[in-house]
Image (spheres, coloured by chain):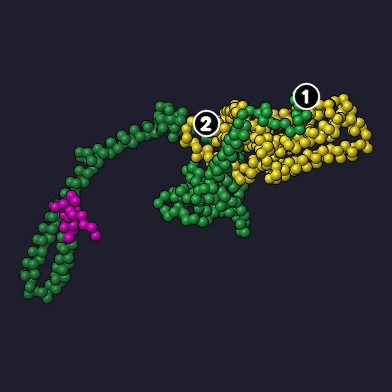
Chain colours: A yellow, B green
Amino acid sequence: MPRTSRRATSAIAHPDLWLASLARYLRSWWYMVHLGAVAIVTAFSPSTWRRESFKATAFHIHTSTWQVLPWFALASSLVSLVIIRIVLVTAKSYGLSQFALEMVVRVLVLELIPLSAALFVALRAGMAFDASALGLARAGLNPVAASNEALRRLRRDLVPQLIANAIAVLSLAMVTSIVVLVLAYVNVYGLSIWGLPDYTRTVGRVFAPTVTAGFVIKTVLFGLAVALIPTAAILELQRYPRRMASTVQPGALRLLFVLIVIEAASLTLKYI
Amino acid sequence: MADNTHHSMTDPSPDPAADEPKHVEAKAAILLVLIGVLVCAFVLYVMYARGVFEPTQRLTLVADDSSGVIPGMDMTFAGFPIGRVAQVDLADDGKVNISVDVQSKDAKWLRTSSVFTLESSIVGETRLRAYTGVLTDAPLPPNSTRTVLRGDATAEIPRIVATARALLENLETMTASESDINASLANLSAVTGRMSGRYGVLGGALGGDAEAQKLMEALDRVNALLGKADQRVFGKAGVMDDTQAAIRQLDVVLKDASNTLKKVDAVLVEAQAVGANTREATEDLSALRGEVDASLRKVNRLVEEINRKWPFARTPQEIKLP
């Protein structure tokens, strides 16, 4: 930690190093994008899909989705229920209850749930991945050997991991969205089926083609970001073993930044 | 942790199945299928909600201003959504064409006489509504074009505020302490005060009880006068009785005159007969007789006329219309 901070201050203090640090910064981003491209290409090439890849993918899906889905759905349903109640009660007190349902669907289903699903998967799967890679890196091997071994393992695990994380984000977002849609219906109309046509029209109005496409693309991008950024950060760490002393999870800040950028871009495209 | 990784490093391709739970692949497959079904169901539901599967007919509404109209908004009839805005575009003539997809099952509510309005309220979205007064008119054919009436609550606000201000100023002028209305009300109050006095409305109209009293006295006197006049004219030995007696006497006099003249006539006939030979000598008598005859006829006519007149008529006179 002290070493990295000294390096950072020295880089800022010496203008002749600015260019070099900028280049390293850009190279780091490029590395991440390149790794993502390689992973996607590998995922779509038939030679990847051997028996053991299937098994590894299934294992990762089991870890990142199957184990957490019920608890995540339950927790986010509870939080959503609270938010739905708040929105409904507030809207009713202002006499705007006809807009409450639309607002609930827009805020919860389109924005909050995908974001929380992405953050949850990032915390859960990304950290698990980091732990194993960091353990590997700290195992006391010489840097070159550790790096080679890590790359080999990552190659074997990278694509299944990416797919599993992307699927995890999609699944959590999808299941919770549907649960929240049902909760919103029950909250607004009660347990009667006669609100269905009205509700269906509201949902249809919210999910315009562009909004739906934006929702799907955003969720997929969240999945990619969550799958890719921590992995790329770890792999890069193998190349710069001196940074390994840092206790900050590699890639966490960058992941947060990318998630916020994706969310902001989607909001901008939708409402501006 | 370090031991684990050590172990995995020594074995370049560790079997992930060693520490994995049972039926991992089956669970993953179930999950994938479930998610796939959910996604497909959701997409189908959204498509259904957006009316992709419903047969529709197109209706084009022409408006001056498209503000507030967005594709996807509903057109309602009696509060029920029956159509959806599909497209909003600017035509070559500068008008806004709003294309509405009306569900075929609800198209029966739209008739050739239907009216379409576009209302924007202060809070909330713009509303597109259809009104059908006569449901027995011919149905609206597909691909019709109709003009939409625009009612904009927010556009009315400045005008309403201006009118309200003028109204308030007028009201202020009217309610000021020296205003005409106040003066009128004060007068009214004085008048009604007088009206509630002894002589009521008379006092109010004449300006005081004293005046009203004078009027009452004058009226009393007129009443007394009328009573006396009645007695003098129509009472016993009144003017009318005298007049009737006089007229009766006149009748008698005239009858006597008539008889006298008849006698004169007879005398004259006698005289004529007596003096037949002396006709030449009495040439003047003939003329005299003609004159007497004429006088007699006049008197006769006069008598008849008087007889015909009330109160001497023997039979009730019929009223003859000219």
Whether labels 2 and 1 belong to a single chain: the reply is no
Query: Where A231 falls versus B106 (above or below)?
Result: above
- Provide the residue designation for mark 2: A186
Residue visible at 42% across and 53% down? Answer: B137
Q: Residue A77 versus residue A40: which sits nearer the camera?
A: A40
The residue that mark 1 highlights is: B2
Is residue A218 on the magenta stretch? no
Can I make out residue A113 in this image? no
Q: Quadrant of residue B42?
A: top right
The chain letter for the residue carrying disc 1 is B
Answer whether residue B304 is magenta in the image: yes
Left of B51 or right of it: where is A131?
A: right
The image shows residue A177 at horizontal and vertical percentages of 60, 34
Question: How many angstroms separate mark 2 from mark 1 (CA)?
Answer: 50 Å
SS label for mark 2: helix
Q: Residue furthest bottom?
A: B280
- Position of B96 relative to B171 (above/below): below
Of circles 2 and 1, the one toward us is 1
User: Type of residue at label 1?
Assistant: Ala
Q: Nearer the viewer, residue B185 or B29?
A: B29
The structure residue drawn at horizontal position 6% and vertical position 67%, both measured from the top left corner, is B270
- In the image: residue A14, left or right of residue B296: right
Residue depicted at x 55% and y 36%: A98
Which of the labelled discs sits on residue B293, or is there none?
none
Packing grade of label 2 (10 A; few <14, some 14-19, many >=20) is some
Q: Which residues are magenta?
A: B301-322
Figure quadrant of the N terminus of chain A: top right
Query: Which of the 4 image quadrants contains residue A125?
Result: top right
Q: Residue at left 62%, top 32%? A: B24
